[in-house]
Image: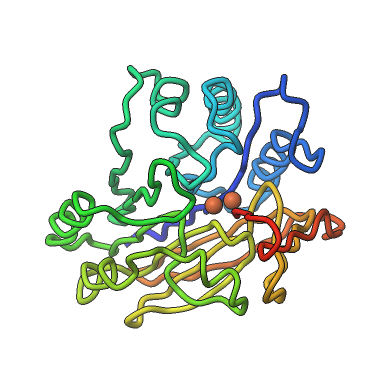
Amino acid sequence: MKAVCFAHLTDIHLNAPEKNNPLFGLDMTAKLRAAFADLASLKTKPAFVLISGDLTQDGDLEDYKHLRTVLDEESAKLGVPVHVGLGNHDFRSPFRQGFLGEEPSEKNYYYAFTHEGLRIVMLSTQIPGSHDGKVDEDQLKWLEDVLSEPAPQGTIVVLHHPITATPSALMDSHLLLNIDELAAVLKGRDVIGVLSGHIHFHNIGSLHGIPCAAATGVAFGMDSTSASTMRFLDNSGYNLAAVKNGKLSIQPRYLPGEHRMLFEWDPAKQPAHA
Ligand SMILES: [Fe+2]
Ligand SMILES: [Fe+2]
């Protein structure tokens, strides 16, 4: 079976250009373009790119129109498709209107596709009005149905909120709310990996023997060793993935940068969200 290499990006937190880089003064569009430039420099080009949510910082219509423009350009330059999922910073209706070019609607956004026998399932953990994450009942039923037939090279499930513990007690409180319900659907099927984001640092774990990898953010990172405060870092990275004969390997990558601390937030004093 043909090997499949692909890139998993997450947490790009894009803003429309007219907002003038409101988050830490960082140019998220430049960071996203730098990640694509890094992909273009690889000796083996990824077959496709996945982005697992927090596509925008504010979820405004103009942000999603800008996202469409940038991803169309970068996808064309790299010559491969880009597939996106929703995170807690995303809003369904402006996403559907601004990015998909559809009528605005609160309909959830999840789907599956297959490439060279490898099935990718893009879930949505987005809960309207909340920064918590959950795979809703309808999706769980749909996923059960999708996984009832195995794919030749197995299935990779992609969702924004991670499902395995981190070194940080604080970030563990940001994991998917219904991990056990999702795990029950994944267990005993052909799932060879679960990819996520949200925590903004590389974190590898496993659940029922399934490898689970969260990637750091393209927009910014978070200090995985901080147990009680959120330490926002100026770094950028993503995961490269390779599937050979139904076996997954993951290579976490950081782009060159200072990794300097941007901001330290104490949630005990003020609410914060990854
Ligand atoms: Fe994020
Ligand atoms: Fe998030």
Residue 140 placement: quadrant: bottom left
Image coordinates for residue 205, horizontal then vertical, percent = 48, 78
Location of the N terminus (image quadrant):
bottom left
Residue at figure coordinates x 23%, y 75% from the top left: 187
Image coordinates for residue 147, horizontal then vertical, percent = 18, 60
Residue at figure coordinates x 79%, y 43% from the top left: 24
Residue 203 placement: quadrant: bottom right
Q: Is residue 32 above or below residue 101?
A: below
Image coordinates for residue 92, horizontal then vertical, percent = 39, 33
Count of number-bearing discs: 0
Q: Is residue 33 above or below residue 150?
A: above
Classify residue 232 as left or right of residue 197.
right
Near-viewer residue (184 or 251): 184
Image coordinates for residue 262, horizontal then vertical, percent = 83, 54
Q: Is residue 218 above or below residue 173?
A: above
Residue at figure coordinates x 41%, y 55% from the top left: 133
Residue at figure coordinates x 77%, y 58% from the top left: 233
